[in-house]
């Protein structure tokens, strides 16, 4: 098998899909996860898809000694894809210290363990760093705006930590991927977004409403300056997103990086409104959705979608799956977890 790639947070939503795509591309994924926001059963689900149970280590990357011991005893790890972080926008407003501690200690411990050692490092960043862009589609050169939440701030500051580390230490080869809105699930419906508690994000709320777990969905505002008044986002299928991480590792392995710190937008380049999502879900699944129009949600930006020409050129990657694929796969996953609770 190919190079060993460490996937932190590898039992999570995007992490688990990336483990599958790494394996499909001939790599040997190794997962480290503290299981604080996921289930160990995901390992069995990944095994059902790829035919192998990935190597798994459970510990908290905020533990400096454990992280250093793990890295030092695994010198054959050639790359890292770092997902492990807290990522709920609303929760971060209530628990800022937990978010800064968890998201920075884990990142700094990982980087410190590689002082003086070559490593290819992919970081899970977010379009949230752009805030409400002045120009759309938003390019990687757009200014980073003041974060609307501690979660968004952890992404902005993490990017600065990575850029400043790369500037003085050429042993790190780093790519930050700024995701837009990851949605959907693997076509097998064996892995997907495991919502814990009341979903904050749109798609899990849509599928839980369709299956009857939620009475209705509220569209947070239809008075925005958009085609139908509801907010615009760049929804990207999680499998396309996972493949972008493999492309980033390959770019660094093949020595194609133009600098040892690069940033890429990972989206479809298309904007879709909330009401268009609801309509697409109903059309692609045949399920009727009970929804109402409610007030705007505090902190929501009006519209954002990515300019993805730089990632297409540099990564040789483009999103291939459309909104219908996203809705159908999200619905199949919802039905699966309804019959097979984790
Ligand atoms: C999408 C749209 C809501 C729920 C967040 C983070 C971002 C990333 C993705 C981690 C918005 C509307 C939602 C509902 C609704 N997370 N909505 N009714 O806020 O764009 O992005 O998740 O990386 O960093 O900021 O995603 O899914 O919460 O909302 O109308 O019940 O759906 O107003 O316009 P968001 P979301």
Image: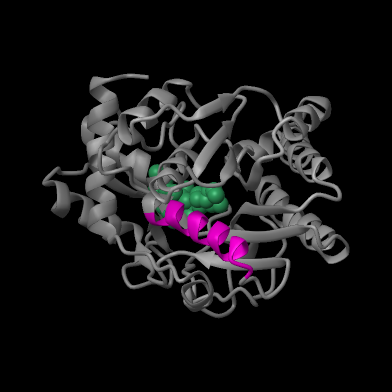
Residue 335, given in percent of the width and then of the height, sits at 22, 31
Quadrant in which the C terminus is drawn: top left
> What span is in magenta?
240-255
Taking the view exactly as shown, the residue that stands out farthest to the front is 1
- Asked whether 147 or 216 is in front, the reply is 147
Can residue 297 be seen at all in this image of the molecule? no
- Asked whether 312 or 150 is in front, the reply is 312
Residue 31, placed above or below residue 306: above
Q: Left or right: where does residue 67 sit relative to residue 266?
A: right
Residue 278, given in percent of the width and then of the height, sits at 26, 53
To which quarter of the image does residue 274 belong?
A: bottom left
Can residue 333 be seen at all in this image of the molecule? yes
To which quarter of the image does residue 63 belong?
A: top right
Q: Residue at x 57, y 76 (%)?
A: 139
Q: Total number of numbered labels?
A: 0
Q: Residue at x 42, y 72 (%)?
A: 269
Magenta run includes residue 242: yes
Residue 69, given in percent of the width and then of the height, sits at 78, 27
Taking the view exactly as shown, the residue that stands out farthest to the left is 286
Looking at the magenta stretch, what is its main secondary structure?
Answer: helix
To which quarter of the image does residue 232 belong?
A: bottom left
Q: Residue at x 26, y 49 (%)?
A: 327
Residue 33, placed above or below residue 127: above
Residue 38, given in percent of the width and then of the height, sits at 50, 27
Taking the view exactly as shown, the residue that stands out farthest to the right is 168
The color scheme shown is: one colour
Magenta run includes residue 296: no
Q: Left or right: where does residue 188 sit relative to residue 239?
A: left
């Amino acid at each position: 098998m190919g190079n060993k790639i460490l996937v932190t947070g590898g039992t999570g939503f995007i992490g688990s899909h990336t483990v599958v795509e790494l394996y499909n591309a001939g790599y040997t994924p190794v997962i480290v996860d503290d299981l604080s926001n996921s289930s160990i059963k995901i390992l069995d689900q990944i095994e059902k898809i790829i035919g192998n149970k990935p190597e798994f280590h459970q510990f908290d990357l905020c533990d400096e000694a454990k992280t250093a011991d793990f890295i030092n005893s695994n010198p054959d790890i050639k790359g890292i894809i770092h997902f492990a972080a807290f990522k709920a926008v609303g929760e971060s407003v209530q628990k800022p210290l937990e978010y800064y501690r968890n998201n920075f200690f884990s990142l700094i411990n990982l980087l410190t363990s590689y002082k003086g050692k070559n490593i290819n490092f992919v970081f899970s960043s977010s379009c949230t760093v752009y805030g409400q862009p002045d120009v759309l589609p938003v390019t990687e050169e757009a200014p980073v705006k003041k974060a609307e939440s501690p979660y968004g701030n952890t992404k902005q500051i993490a990017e600065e930590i990575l850029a400043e580390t790369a500037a003085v230490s050429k042993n790190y080869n780093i790519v930050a991927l700024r995701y837009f809105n990851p949605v959907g699930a693997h076509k097998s419906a064996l892995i997907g977004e495991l919502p814990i508690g009341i979903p904050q994000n749109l798609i899990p709320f849509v599928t839980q409403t369709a299956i009857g777990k939620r009475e209705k969905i509220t569209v947070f505002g239809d008075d925005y300056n958009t085609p139908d008044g509801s907010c615009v986002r760049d929804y990207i299928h999680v499998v396309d997103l996972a493949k972008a991480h493999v492309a980033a590792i390959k770019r660094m392995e093949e020595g194609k990086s133009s600098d040892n710190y690069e940033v890429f937008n990972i989206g479809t380049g298309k904007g879709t409104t909330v009401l268009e999502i609801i309509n697409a879900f109903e059309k692609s699944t045949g399920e009727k959705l009970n929804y109402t129009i409610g007030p705007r949600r505090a902190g929501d930006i009006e519209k954002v979608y990515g300019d993805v020409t730089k990632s297409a050129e540099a990564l040789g990657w483009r999103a291939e799956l459309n909104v219908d694929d996203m809705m159908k796969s999200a619905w199949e996953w919802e039905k699966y977890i309804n019959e097979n609770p984790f």
